Amino acid sequence: MAAAELGVGIGWRTELDLTIERMEGVGFVEAIAENIRPGALPESLRLLRARGVPVIPHGVSLGVGGAEPPSAGRLAHLAACAEALDAPLVSEHLAFVRGDGVEAGHLLPIPRTRESLRVVTDNVRRAQDALPVPLALENVAAIFGWPDDELTEGQFLAELVERTGVRLLVDVANLYTNQVNLGLPAVAALDALPLEHLAYVHVAGGHEHQGIWHDTHTTAAPEQVLDLLTELCARTRPPGVLLEWDDRFPSDAVLAGELDRIRAAMAAGESG
């Protein structure tokens, strides 16, 4: 099944509901699944759906990167969100978030080992079986790496896709973060990824502090992140590209300008 054509979108937040409703050219939005009650959707999301704007539930707590199978309750919630929103897919993170009942409070990187790949493959298959729509997994930002990694991020994701058919949510800001913090070449990661399984792309801003890049989603995307989007678009036409902005919200005009920057970066890649 071909990925849904989404266009250029923005992460829906309650603080941005009226802004997004007024924006021209928003192709889709993404809403944090844990903040949604399927039986009582926010009026703004109902309005956007009535206009034909796709809404993608984006989970942050499933934890497919952990040793324990994903929670049946969390999977049921994601499934209910997808059905309530008539979503084309559900997205989550390839991350470790809890162990033995203890919450990490952050989206942590997983060890990229063969054993980890086996566990994650099983977890992803369980999730796919429980969801009524396709699942897309996002690469995460990291400030540390595991010493026993056997595969690069691109290799790990490529093998996971081959085993499960899961789709990819490629966050180019996270690729940039890992390049700065861990020395992992972002363009090489793009070259290793099976982009024919791309569901959509994330773009976001952050800031550097004492040599560490923090993916905060609180500022405009740096040119290096948009350059990676251009590189990706030179390789494939992404079904969708979405701007994440989670706090310290700017004016409507600034957000509209960020979507225009994304469109320009995409056009540069497609024409290159």
Image: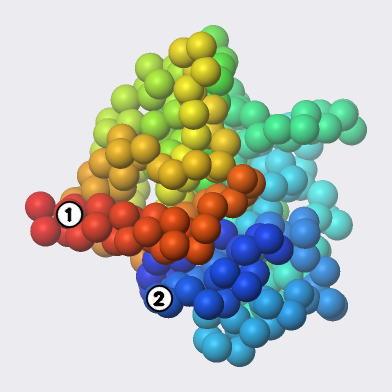
How many marks can you see?
A: 2
Sequence-wise, the earlier of marks 1 and 2 is 2
Q: In the rendered view, would you say 205 is above or below 264? A: above
Q: Is residue 3 visible?
A: no
Q: Nearer the viewer, residue 257 or 5?
A: 257
Task: Look at mark 2 in the image and give the residue it sits on.
Answer: 25
Q: Quadrant of residue 19?
A: bottom right
Q: Nearer the viewer, residue 160 or 237?
A: 237
Q: Residues within 10 Å of mark 2 (few under 14, many from 20)?
A: few
Q: Check disc 1 and report the residue beneath it.
A: 268
User: Horizontal and vertical percent for residue 130?
Assistant: 72, 63
Q: What is the basis of the colouring in this image?
A: rainbow
Give residue 34's position: percent from left, percent from top. 77, 56
Tell me the residue at 58%/23% (across/down): 111
Residues at circles 1 and 2 in contact by the CB criterion of under 8 Å = no
Residue 74 pos. (x, y %): 80, 55
Label 1's element?
A: helix
Is label 1 or label 2 in front? Answer: 2
Which disc is residue 80 wearing?
none
- Name the residue: 52% across, 18% down: 209
What distance separates the C-alpha of mark 1 from that of mark 2? 19 Å
175 vs 270, left or right, is right
Q: Is residue 132 above or below residue 128?
A: below
Secondary structure of the residue carrying tag 2 is loop
Please name the amino acid that badge 1 sits on: Ala
What's the residue type where badge 2 is placed? Gly
- Identify the residue at horizontal 44%, vertical 26% (top origin): 178
State which quarter of the image contains the N terminus.
Answer: bottom left
Q: Please state which of residues 232 and 21 is positioned toward the viewer in this rendering.
A: 21
